[in-house]
Amino acid sequence: MKPKTIDEINKRILEGSAVVVTAEEMKEIVEEEGTKKAAEKVDVVTTGTFGAMCSSGVFFNFGHSDPPIKMQKIWLNDVEAYTGVAAVDAYLGVTQISESQGMEYGGAHVIEDFVKGREVELKAEAYGTDCYPRKEIVTEITLDDVNQAEMVNPRNAYQRYKAATNSSGNVLKTYMGTLLPNFGNVTFAGTGEISPLNNDPEYRTIGLGTRIFLCGAEGYIIGAGTQHAPPFGTLMVKGDLKEMDPKYMKACVFPEYGVSMFIGIGIPIPILDGEMARFTAVRDRDIETEILDYGVPRRNRPVIRKVNYEELKSGKVEINGEEVRVSPLSSYLVARKIMEELKRRIEKAEFFLSQPVKRIPVKSEFKPMRQKEIVVVKNLMSEAIKISQETSVVEASKIIIDKGVNHLPVVDSEDRLRGIVTSWDIAKAVARGRVGKVEEIMTTKVITVYPEDPIEFAAEKLKKFDISALPVIDAKKRVLGLLSSEDLSRLITKRRG
């Protein structure tokens, strides 16, 4: 077939003859008719995603007060916005939290309040100048009162995400939701086969200048998003907040992590040829990712296993021979509504496609932060003198005296940590006549670290739990060493020296 052009498709949209289908419908069409016939038949495929997009926010211009003020600091409903832009301009990020309510309310809630037509308190401070003499102002404003409110999101519409689980013995509160201990659950984000970038993985039609559906408004792609690293691509987008619909945005709170905002994005994919038809036929089973272990607090977290979106959406995956339940952090229901709404607008000639003026790069390197000195636990840990649960209190006391140590990790036959006893535990036990096995006096809920953990992380644990040593374990809870406050003291002395 002769390749189509976006201009030709727009002409069909205007005439009312364009064939528009959702990404879900396109899978079936390609399966039944093949890519060539599907490309001849279909003009546009609509896609959708609705998930938490932390890297989002809004630029505001509030207009000048009388007398005028050059805002040095500004708060909207007690949430601080960035003012290093101009006299009465500010950028409010969705993750900024309230100074009075903490994580229960943040920038995302302020933005949602604006879109819902509610009044928002504006409070500003300034140092005062000859041309901007005012030093403070407090007033109430609505979205209609501001001159501009442009949503500009540095990183949205993730192509796919890494899934998350937790091997540790503690509940973890993360940006991937609440992760239960001992591989108790898996969480994932993204809408898989209907997500925009999965339907144009080589960014042939999605690029700088592409017109998109953004929270109910007409928006645009303004470049690759931050951390863009295909096949984990991202987009930088913008749109007019005054035209947005609260149905397609939602402030949210991740417990003990912070505030974010669910952002609704739909992108129309023009079917220019058979290749584009093939791209939009992608299935969840074709979209692979990895389950990472967030129980290891490192940038390079261990990969538990590879998985595809079909498995994730099934609600369960297998880890170490056990069935683990899976929960989504994105709304497939709202993403479907976005696809359907975008389809309706195109069919009614209320939304047209745009030709990208520049392509999004298909290759990009995402580098870690450069650090001058990285000291991890394994660089400082000492040898651990281990004992078994059957060891007597008397034997343990002799080991402490002979070896000159204060902590004895208690392990099983496979070297896995079962508890810990200290010289203080031994002293108390002897004083009270409890000279049986150490399993009777040991602490079983042990605070631990991994060998690759940053030393600062370990120091924070010692301080938080008011303890003097941490057993160092691997992913199977086998004891590798011991990190004590004395080890940290040696590091501090070395740095000062």
Image: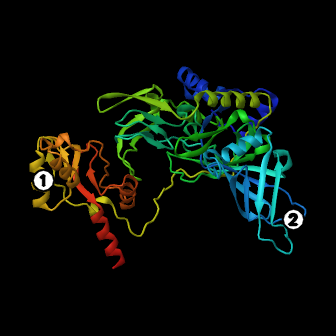
User: As drawn, is 218 to the left or to the right of 397?
Assistant: right
- How packed is label 1: few (under 14 Cα within 10 Å), some, or many (20 or more)? some
Label drawn at residue 68:
2
Looking at the picture, does residue 127 appear above or below residue 112? Answer: below
User: Which residue sits furthest bottom?
Assistant: 497
Residue 42 appears in the rendering: no
Residue at 47% over, 32% down: 309
Earlier in the chain: of badge 2 and badge 1, it is: 2
User: Which residue sits furthest top?
Assistant: 32
Q: Nearer the viewer, residue 463 or 172?
A: 463
**Given the image, on which type of amino acid does mark 2 rest?**
Pro
- How packed is label 2: few (under 14 Cα within 10 Å), some, or many (20 or more)? some
Q: Which quadrant of the figure has residue 50?
A: top right
Looking at the picture, does residue 375 appear above or below residue 36? Answer: below
Q: Which residue is mark 1?
A: 397
Q: Which quadrant of the figure has residue 454?
A: bottom left
Looking at the picture, does residue 211 appear above or below residue 313? Answer: below
User: As drawn, is 452 to the left or to the right of 215?
Assistant: left
Quadrant where the C terminus sits is: bottom left
User: As drawn, is 337 to the left or to the right of 177?
Assistant: right
Q: Which quadrant of the figure has residue 63?
A: bottom right
